[in-house]
Image (cartoon, coloured by chain):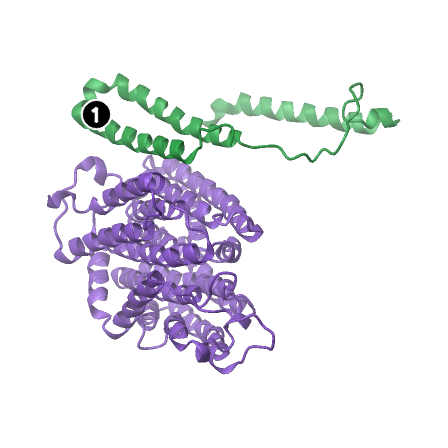
Amino acid sequence: MSSWIHVAPLVLLVGGGLFIMLADVFAKERPELATVTSVALGVSGCVSLAALVSGVAPQTPAFLTSYLAVDKMALFFDVVICTGAALSTLLAGGYLREHGYERGEFYVLTLFSAFGAMVLARSVDLLSLFVGLETMSLGVYALVAFRRASARAVEGAMKYFLLGSFAAAILLFGSALLYAATGHTDYAGIAEGIAAGADPRLVLAGMLLVVVGLTFKVSAVPFHMWTPDAYEGAMTPATTFMSVAVKAAAFAVFLRVLVVAFGDPMSMSEASGWPPALAALAALSMVYGNFAAVSQQNIKRMLAYSSIAHAGYVLVGVVAVFRVGDEAISAVLFYLLAYTVSNALALGSLILMGSKGREAVSYDDLRGVGRRHPMAALPFVIGVLSLMGFPPTAGFFGKYYVFNAAVHSGGGMVWLALLGVLSSAVGAYYYLRVIVVMFMKEPEKGQVLAVPMRSGYVVTALSIAGLAVMELGLMPGWFLDLAVQAAQQLVA
Amino acid sequence: MLSVYLPVFLLLAVAALVAILMFTLTSVLGPKKPTPEKLLPYESGSNTTGASHLRLSVKFYLTAILFVVFDIEAVFLYPWGSMFRELGWFGFVEMLGFLTILAVTLVYAWKKGALEWET
């Protein structure tokens, strides 16, 4: 039994997805699909967490392990992705019903997309990487276009789809070059090929193309163009899913590719490898994301630019891998977990503060919400403080570990960490501005007020996310320990 | 190794050159005397009537998508069938899982009305 526990979460999600499809078309009354979906995701997350904590040794057959990793990092990312997807589903349970978009497809797409994300996070071969990436992305494209009568949704989905296809093509081209250079598609084989003296020009070109394809998915500058439109056009629960689960999976595969395939001295050198390129992307993302977020009038767009900035922070940790291996990896893992719950909390309370026809999306909608409906505003405050990196929330330790890893790397990385701290100070401005608007501004006369909705689903999601944010902020040790174990296993 | 392909590249280059040359020469040397008849999309066809921006029903896309899905299924079945004995029970179970997933999809598409032409 224990031999299959490492792939049980994947099987569970596929089974759950098929069940929901059938339930959707055969049920006489409107079924509670949000409950079923979030339970399926929650159970898979718990199975992974149990396997991670108990440290049960995998005995999975070789036909699987040559494509999918069965290590602690895979399990850690299962937990992150399932948490993000389950929270999005719970939020959708309230949002879709309130705004009249209740359709079973949303849950099916989310489940299969989460499955793709989990495959992506455990891929150890360029082939399974691509299959996972496409399974995840196709679901998300459809999720963005879910409100198909809305021009904004279709525009966002179209941009995301076209640019995403190009990014996938670039990634494939890079994979082809790597295969041409080394004769392998699995990461370990690529590393062997590089060590055996593959043509460094081909390897470099292939590596850069693969990195570009992946940076697109994490929405780092300059491959971020689709992010604000797609995040704004998508319904808020779908935005939540995209910003947490998709991003986490993309970073997981980033770590695996860089550590396993390009961990050789040549590829990791500061002169001719990935560290300088990724460091530049990290710096650009942090600075651009934070400054662009300042001038936004729409909260979802502001959070989209802030997610670009957060991709920059995580990239700082990814770059630090070339010097302080497992410390940097564990920092990235912890950051992604913290970001998942914080962002779900912020976007979730944005959902809670609106109701049918009166969705809260702009700063003006939020004027005085904190005084009129303090309980609806509270989760937003906690989420935003965590995104800002304010102690004692999850975001504080996420940032702390990442920048700490950068400082320990020494050299130019110290400057990168400094830039990160400075740009998060810019971030504090626009995060605090929302809080100021909510508590210290009064709505203008004649303005249509956003009225909070009532939904057990949304309240449940916010309670879970809020507790997780505080738990990770007050007692980060337990999850950090799991992240460290996962990181050490990957590096070893 | 690339030298094997040299004739191919040469042919490509010559073909591109000839095409570019032809088009350039006709546009530079050719006489241009446009008349309303010559500017029509189909010079000797019937005249167009009405607006060209018609809205067409695109219900073919569902059929096309379903065709692709089940075409892939057939493509998968052929190599599996030819390797059936070598793959044994393992291959049988794998293929059973694949077909189950597709069967569920078909039931779903059917119940959703994707197979109805007149809706």
Q: Residue at x 44, y 26 (%)?
A: B67
Residue A175 at x, y percent in the picture = 39, 40
Q: Secondary structure at mark 1?
A: helix
Q: Residue at x 40, y 44 (%)?
A: A105
Q: Residues within 10 Å of mark 1 (few under 14, many from 20)?
A: some
Q: Residue at x 49, y 68 (%)?
A: A290
Quadrant of the snapshot with the N terminus of chain A: top left
- Amino acid under disc 1: Phe
Q: Residue at x 38, y 34 (%)?
A: B111
Q: Chain of mark 1?
A: B
Tell me: residue B110, above or below residue A122: above
* Count of numbered circles in the view: 1
Residue A458 lies in what quarter of the image? bottom left
Observer-nearest residue: A240 or A18? A18
Q: Is residue A26 left or right of residue A221?
A: left
Observer-nearest residue: A391 or B32? A391
Residue A271 at x, y percent in the picture = 41, 56
Residue A472 lies in what quarter of the image? bottom left
Tell me: residue A97, above or below residue A447: above
Q: Is residue A408 left or right of residue A374?
A: left
**Name of the residue lying farthest toward the front:** A28
Q: Is residue A75 visible?
A: no
Per the rendering, the colour in which chain A appears is purple
Residue A326 at x, y percent in the picture = 25, 60
Q: Is residue B109 visible?
A: yes
**Residue identifier under label 1:** B92
Task: Specify the chain shown as green.
Answer: B
Residue A93 at x, y percent in the picture = 37, 56
